[in-house]
Image (cartoon, coloured by chain):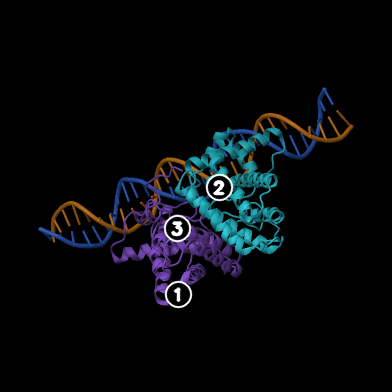
Chain colours: A purple, B cyan, C blue, D orange
Amino acid sequence: MNQDRTTGTRRRLPVQKRSLERFERLLDACAELLDEVGYSALTTKEVARRAGVPIGTLYQFFSDREGLVGALATRNLESFLGRVTERLEREAPDGIAGLVEVTVDEFVAMRRTITGFGVVDFGAAGQDHTLEPGRDNNSAVAGRLRALTASLTGVEDDTELELALRVALECADGVLQLAFRTHPKGDPQLIAECKRVLNSYLNGRLRMASPRR
Amino acid sequence: MNQDRTTGTRRRLPVQKRSLERFERLLDACAELLDEVGYSALTTKEVARRAGVPIGTLYQFFSDREGLVGALATRNLESFLGRVTERLEREAPDGIAGLVEVTVDEFVAMRRTITGFGVVDFGAAGQDHTLEPGRDNNSAVAGRLRALTASLTGVEDDTELELALRVALECADGVLQLAFRTHPKGDPQLIAECKRVLNSYLNGRLRMASPRR
DNA sequence: CCATTAACATGAGCACTACTCATGTTTGAG
DNA sequence: CTCAAACATGAGTAGTGCTCATGTTAATGG
């Protein structure tokens, strides 16, 4: 797996207002097109056309097609983390069950409403490592969820917690992907099953506030 | 997700000996190249060149690039099911734990030894539905594992069992993918975690026929 | 044995892609 | 106003997936 290191990155950050608008419009067009034709049939020309932006400008912001999709994944991820963080802080559910409930429901809600979310998730097919160099995307999410989880459930905030969260995220990702493959709105049975997996694993894995071991 | 129905399928099955050899050589070359350059950089021309087969012949067997990779996934899946079935029948481990142990270990073993297995798994990135029309690949695996599981664990062989297996497979797939992303030979900690997830979920989900609970 | 037909093999060529880069346009400091 | 640095543009380039007319081999029947 020897990927070219210069691939899949951003190129220049938009600084002026007009540029930033274009940047955002490109991501919107990309998301829309992903929903319509899927990842493999996505063409940069069509994305640029829909965004009303010449093709050369697209390549000023994004190094290549993967970079474009990766930037969309990053935007999705930031949005997801923002929403989850906000809900958790406001509702402050206690215990693992509450945390699982909120996180899964928020994911499902985004999957239903955010264009292109189903295709790119937090990292497009075949590519990882788009968010933070050296970590795959789900691990980056796990890192961000760690502190949040620790404060809410009372478990110790250590590397074991992060391991458990990374594992949990992979499971959730897989099962929810299946849920939406089975049913356009997300098969409710599978969504429930997803929560069950997470609860049984995390409850057995993490010891609550009580001292370690 | 409006995929062209004629996409990603086989075209003509090789019937003569020479053709079958070429078919197999194409899959081998495909697997090799996948390991070297990854899915997105895989070119049909190079696959054909390595297999010593003209490009036109490749397209006699496979409808397109996806069909080629899909056929490789199918071969991997058949091989996996064969190996798991054989081991389960010979060793006849009892209980869920034994089943999980064998299945995960066999997957890990293949991931370490079979060329290209890490990239295509049982279904390449972005594409599903390559094995049986209307079912995604992991569901097809679940169907094949169902009877096997029922006879070994004594749980009832019904749709609930299949649901649980589909969910379990998605989780295993995700966590093991992570394990091999983290470590080239498969992070042992994550492999252990994978078994833990499956055990805790399946034990809570399935009621044994001979309950020692 | 040959004649006829169907199945298979081949690779130059076509349509289309991702991406570049020379040229034109805007911006802003002095 | 001057002048150069930063940004915008889209025709062009190299290379892809895939086709299909033409040639070759095998199967069948008498």
Judged by depth in the image, the label closer to the viewer, 3 or 2, is 3
Q: Is residue A124 left or right of residue B201?
A: left
Judged by depth in the image, the label closer to the viewer, 2 or 1, is 1
Per the rendering, the mark at residue B149 is: none
- Residue B97 occupies quadrant: bottom right
Mark 1 falls on what kind of element?
A: loop
- Residue A16 occupies quadrant: bottom left
**Residue B53 location in percent, x, y?**
59, 34
Judged by depth in the image, the label closer to the viewer, 3 or 1, is 1
Q: For mark 3, what is the residue?
A: A138
Q: For mark 1, what is the residue?
A: A93
Q: For mark 2, what is the residue?
A: B120
Q: Quadrant of the C terminus of chain A?
A: bottom left
Q: Earlier in the sequence, mark 3 or mark 1?
A: 1
Type of amino acid under label 3: Asn
Type of amino acid under label 2: Val
Mark pair 3, 1: CA separation: 23 Å
